Image (cartoon, rainbow, N blue to C red):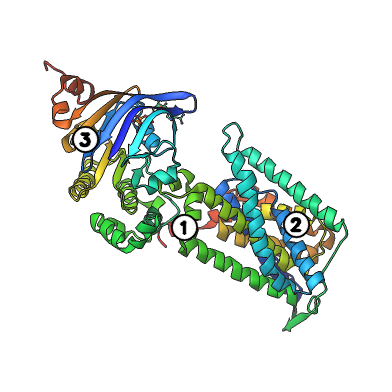
Amino acid sequence: MLHIEQLNAGYGDVQILWDVTLDVRPGELIALVGANGAGKTTLLNAISALVTRYRGKILFDGKDLTRLAPYEVARLGIAHVPEGRRLFPGMTVRENLEVGAMSKEARSKLKTSLEEVYSLFPILKERERQEAGTLSGGQQQMLAIARALMSRPKLLMIDEASLGLAPKVVGEIYDTLLDIRKAGLTMLIVEQNVALALDVCQRAYVLENGRVAVSGECKKLQNDPKVQEAYLGIIEGI
Amino acid sequence: MLDFLQALIWGILLGGMYALIAIGMTLIMGVMKIINLAHGALVMVGMYITYVLNVQFGLDPYIGLFIAMPTLFLLGALIQLLLINRIIDVDAILPENQVLLTVGIMVVLTETMRLLFHSDYRSVQTSYASENIHIGGISLSVPMTIGFFVALVFVLLLHLFLKKTHYGRMIRATAEDRIAAQYMGIPPKTVTVVTFGLGSALAAAGGALLLPIFYLWPDIGHLFTAKAFIITILGGLGSIVGAFFGGLLIGVFESLGATYVSMGYKDVYGLVVFLLVLLFLPGGLKSLRFPALRRER
Ligand SMILES: Nc1ncnc2c1ncn2[C@@H]1O[C@H](COP(=O)(O)OP(=O)(O)OP(=O)(O)O)[C@@H](O)[C@H]1O
Ligand SMILES: [Mg+2]
């Protein structure tokens, strides 16, 4: 579904990603993990066309994304929940969701989509008329995910689903994400909490200094001593 | 007391028309984060179009308005498409330079009009220009009253457009967060073109409404740029409701000042309000909305 090959990308002259190769197949939940500054956000933004791509391929359903503008990528069916959520703070919850449904097709299914996201996140229905900027952190994260779902995407990318949220809320959000995945949506998720990510994903990519250091099935990575030591805080011999 | 009421009402009527012009500037400010210093020149061009339609074809200014508006929509959209959008793409050019570009556009528009019409003062002759409606002891100028209510209708229409339509939502989303809007699949360039067109059309509307009241000459644009700028800041940069009340406030101060202090300093009173607001309410009128009320609407 998404095929990235030998991608080099960065900000102007500052190259961040080096020869990144990554695949997302239909129905998969892929985790992208790595230390702060490893380049996870940059990779998602390279897919969304918001950073400079120097070399390499990004194919989505066979279409080349490297020459498209950000809004064109979004309209192909890639929804991006950005780092920091970037809600429209002065617009109401409902209006944020409506803006999420931009394409003609999404707009024609607006009612159905609204019902769907409200049943996933009932609190949003309660807060429908409240300005997004006044929601709690957890509610904002739910709204950011719901807003992305309003476009009825083929691929959902989430940058930091759990950052800054209480464990209980993280649990709720991940339960919902797993439900969405069962319904067939493909996901690429950046997650600080590596243990959590490896628990729910099929495959994972570990970025280090802008390169893919390790990748593979999540179950295997969970038992990989290198990953355990670097990301799971498990040190051999203790 | 009657004098005061009279001055107050005249100020509100005039302020409504100023507000319309300033809302055009505010709209552009909100989406592009720049002050459009050609805004007054666009008002002036709108006035000349309405003027020519009146003297050449005998069209009433209130009808000419409906030709001036789409024409200025087109002019504004083209300015954005062909000039401003081109320099947005160049990383080496700072956003501030977009403002410089609008100064250039202002000069070109003003001097083009001077070439065509010279610097002469002009005005339209209408049957109602000096008519008054009398209510109680107060007399209301007919063109000012019509102008106010037409302006009010346009402000309400704009409000509905921004709130209820797909395009309106795209404009608001882009104004709130240009990057996030792109994640949603909103094409930012299209939005800026439509916004600049709309802002220009509102400028033209304001100009056409003021034509029966004001003299017209190529440099009148500077006056409107200054007023719209003050009102935009007064309203709290990018807030349309704020700009509307800011417009009324400036109108009232001008009118009260002209009545009680001196007619000659009419354009100075606005600046005084401006300074007071910067000193005591730097967030503009927008910041007056109580935080408690902000939570739920
Ligand atoms: N706008 C920018 N201009 C230049 N360099 C940038 C820019 N944004 C990020 N970088 C650099 O790119 C590198 C990768 O950043 P990125 O945000 O992709 O990391 P990340 O893996 O998402 O980290 P985190 O977990 O902290 O979010 C960092 O070294 C960062 O300093
Ligand atoms: Mg990041």
Would you place residue A54 above or below residue A114 in this image?
above
Q: Which mark is residue B169?
A: 1
How far across and down, in percent of the image, does residue A119 sit?
A: 24, 58
Q: Is residue B293 left or right of residue A120?
A: right
Give the amino acid type for the residue marked by disc 3 in the picture.
Answer: Ala
Give the amino acid type for the residue marked by disc 2 in the picture.
Answer: Tyr
Tell me what residue is drawn at x 69 percent, y 60 percent: B250
Write down the chain letter for disc 3: A
Disc on the earlier residue, 2 or 1: 1
Write down the chain letter for disc 2: B
Screen quadrant of the C terminus of chain A: top left
Tell me what residue is drawn at x 67 percent, y 71 percent: B148
Of helix, strand and loop, which one carries label 3? helix
Task: Residue at the far top: name it.
Answer: A237
Circles 3 and 1 on the same subunit: no
Q: Which mark is residue A197?
A: 3
Give the amino acid type for the residue marked by disc 1 in the picture.
Answer: Arg
Label 2, residues with CA under 10 Å away: few <14, some 14-19, many ≥20: many
Circles 2 and 1 on the same subunit: yes
**Mark 3 sits near ligand 1, with its Cβ under 8 Å away:** no
Screen quadrant of the N terminus of chain A: top left
Write down the chain letter for disc 1: B
Q: Is label 2 or label 1 in front? A: 1
Q: Is residue A154 visible?
A: yes
How far across and down, in percent of the image, does residue B172 sit?
A: 49, 54
Tell me what residue is drawn at x 68 percent, y 42 percent: B101
Identify which residue, B108 or B6, lies in the foreground.
B108
Q: Which mark is residue B269?
A: 2
Q: Are marks 3 and 2 in contact (CB under 8 Å)?
A: no
Identify which residue, B266 or A81, lies in the foreground.
A81
